[in-house]
Image (spheres, rainbow, N blue to C red):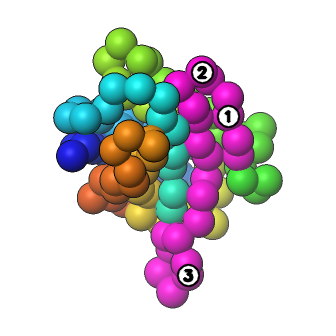
Amino acid sequence: QVQLVESGGGLVQAGGSLRLSCAASGSIAGTNTMGWYRQAPGKQRELVAAISTSGYTMYKDSVKGRFTISRDNVKNTAYLQMSRMKPEDTAVYYCKFTSLNSGDFWGRGTQVTVSS
């Protein structure tokens, strides 16, 4: 089992910044990928960004240049730095942990609201 604890969500004005954190614990040894997904009301959950143990990253096109994903493998924590935020970034943001050893696990989500 893997436990994920997200933090850092909140309310921000358009153009502002927020940083999300996702701390993983439990059966997390070995190669894995940590990702951030988001789900807006009435829409499907979508991948925002992901990062592997080795540091390989990928981003949704609409956040490239504005969001940065990173991780601290000592602290077993992934971060999503969000800058120049837009109202369309408003959603519940979920952390996901994926590994061949443990499987897929999701955090409970954290609300991010961007006001115009």
Q: Nearer the viewer, residue 28 or 58?
A: 28
Query: Which region of the structure is painted magenta?
Result: 39-59
Q: Position of residue 51 (x, y in %)?
A: 58, 34
The picture places residue 68, in percent across and down from the top left corner, at 63, 33
- Report the disc number at residue 43: 3
What residue is shown with label 1? Answer: 57
Q: Spot the residue most to the top.
A: 74
Few, some or many C-alpha atoms within 10 Å of disc 1 (few <14, some 14-19, many ≥20)? some
Tag 3 secondary structure? loop
Identify the residue shown where x is 52% and y is 71%: 45
Which amino acid does the dot numbered 1 rest on?
Thr
First along the sequence among labels 1 and 3 = 3
Q: Quadrant of the C terminus?
A: bottom right
Q: Residue at x 44, y 42 (%)?
A: 99
Residue found 55% across the figure and 81% down from its top: 43
Q: Is residue 30 magenta?
A: no
Say which residue label 2 marks: 54
Kind of residue indicated by mark 2: Ser
